[in-house]
Amino acid sequence: MTSKSSFKMYRIALVNLLLVFVYTGMFGQGYDKNLQKLQLTYQVINALYVDSVDQGNLTEEAIVGMLKSLDPHSVYISADEVAAMNEPLDGSFDGIGIQFNIMNDTLMVVTPLIGGPSEKVGIIAGDRIVTIDGDNVAGVGLKNSDVFKYLRGKKGTKVKLAVNRKGSDLKFTVERDKIPIHSVESAYMADPKTAYVKITRFALNTHDEFLEALDKLEPNNFENLIIDLRGNGGGYLKAAIDIADELIDEDKLLVYTQGINSPRQSHNAAKKGRFEEGKLVVLMDEGSASASEIVAGAVQDWDRGIVIGRRSFGKGLVQRPFDFPDGSMIRLTIAKYHTPSGRCIQKDYSKGEDAYHFEIGERYLHGEMLNSDSIQFDESLKYTTKIKGRTVYGGGGIMPDLFIPVDTTMYSNYYRDLVASGTVNKVILAYVDNNRELLKGQYKSFNQFNEEFEISQSLIDELIKNGEEEDIEKNEEELAISEKFMLTQMKALIARDLFNTSEYFETINILSESYTKALEVLSDKRDYSDYLK
């Protein structure tokens, strides 16, 4: 036997002896047997595996595997992903404060954020950024992710920009600052008596933004309120509780959480809310989840208002973050949340993660999106609302009081392809860029724009032409099907670029059956009361 072989045998024997020592030692100390098994596996792999081992990756894969076996919402998040994940919920990031788009391989400022660092130094909509800190960014295949890397950075740091403005070269030095991420995307008067507020996520600043929206609308003396939670995937539990507290009487239970290792914790309305008495509608759809379902569940269970739309996602699990020293974390499900009636709306996840997430697709396949009669609830999960005693169900999301099917009447593959290829956005950006001063001079306010502006035939022709350049052939029949939606969306995109995101929703909402039905129900006192019987 060679000395090399002897050394290898000696090493293996030594490792085995060490493992036996550790194994018996842990038993003697009363350690968990399963933890011993996991530790020993890790040690054996590191000591004896045929190839070199990335220990960090090995550990992460083990953590991912353990969490994946629990439920779809217990997850491991690497250090690199933590900041990006938290950003929308923390409500801000550090940057220069512009909305941008990459058009014809050029970084174009769509609009500087009001009061932001870029606006303060004089950057305006339509400016082309050609260099950033001396690096050429024009005509180099720039991607959105590249722009973020260039323009985001710590508050107080500076970035030098070279800008082309209608043929003139300008230079700016912009000091990065906190840039808010808004969770209340739109707030306006839907009719003389009805305020509309759209909440897209539940973040740290959501409650403050909601109150600011009500302050802005209060001079209109609104009597009714529509809260739009469609597509809102949730966020912070506290933010949902704070919003519900503004709608429901003091001391009433809003939600409670409970798990095997987490004692029941009840959250009650703690103060006099801003809108506890007027008529209320909450809009939901299959994209409304978690915190959105907490708000809708509290409103529904207390018979406080009407939920309109389609069955929500069905996420009733509470995650708690646990941070690791390297900046990574796990988000572990520690409890289930229950609406005031006692129902947990978490849908089944026993068939695995793929089936869990495809469940929305299953709703389409068996017809639920078009007909509420296709929805089957477990009778053992039947509950009653707190005031009127209406029947509600747990175990599968919030079922609306008034079901609105998916509208497919304006859908066509032709227009979908125009949107998906980026052609619609490209044409609108170019149109606004070329006509911004003319449009702003002609339309002094959004109301004037909304009443008077119409999409011209020449702009439609430009869209069709650009589509053909992307190999999307004109289809007259499908164009006719989607014409109303196409014209409205194009107008809404122009409104967004000229004014703000709120005006986008104010323009596009007229095509939403959920929205128009809400206005109809709110305008009829008898109709509103009937849905709460």
Image (cartoon, rainbow, N blue to C red):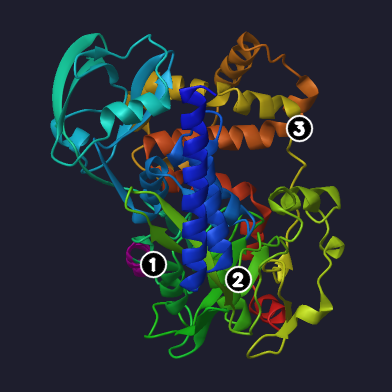
Q: Earlier in the sequence, mark 2 or mark 1?
A: 1
Above or below, 99 relative to 421: below
Q: Earlier in the sequence, mark 3 or mark 2?
A: 3
SS at badge 1: helix
Q: Quadrant of residue 90?
A: bottom left
Check if residue 214 falls in the magenta segment: yes
Name the amino acid type tagged 3: Ile
SS at badge 2: helix
Query: Which stretch appears magenta?
Result: 208-219
Depth order, front residue of 25/493: 25
Q: Which mark is residue 481?
A: 3
Q: Which mark is residue 522?
A: 2
Q: Is residue 38 visible?
A: yes
Q: Residue at x 69, y 68 (%)?
A: 400
Q: Quadrant of residue 220?
A: bottom left
Residue under label 1, please give it: 220
Q: Quadrant of the C terminus?
A: bottom right
Q: Are marks 1 and 3 in contact (CB under 8 Å)?
A: no
Q: Position of residue 196 (x, y in %)?
A: 49, 61
Name the amino acid type tagged 2: Leu
Depth order, front residue of 137/510: 137
Q: Are marks 2 and 1 in contact (CB under 8 Å)?
A: no
Alpha carbon separation for disc pair 1 and 3: 38 Å
Q: Residue at x 56, y 30 (%)?
A: 50
Left or right of 483, for residue 488? left
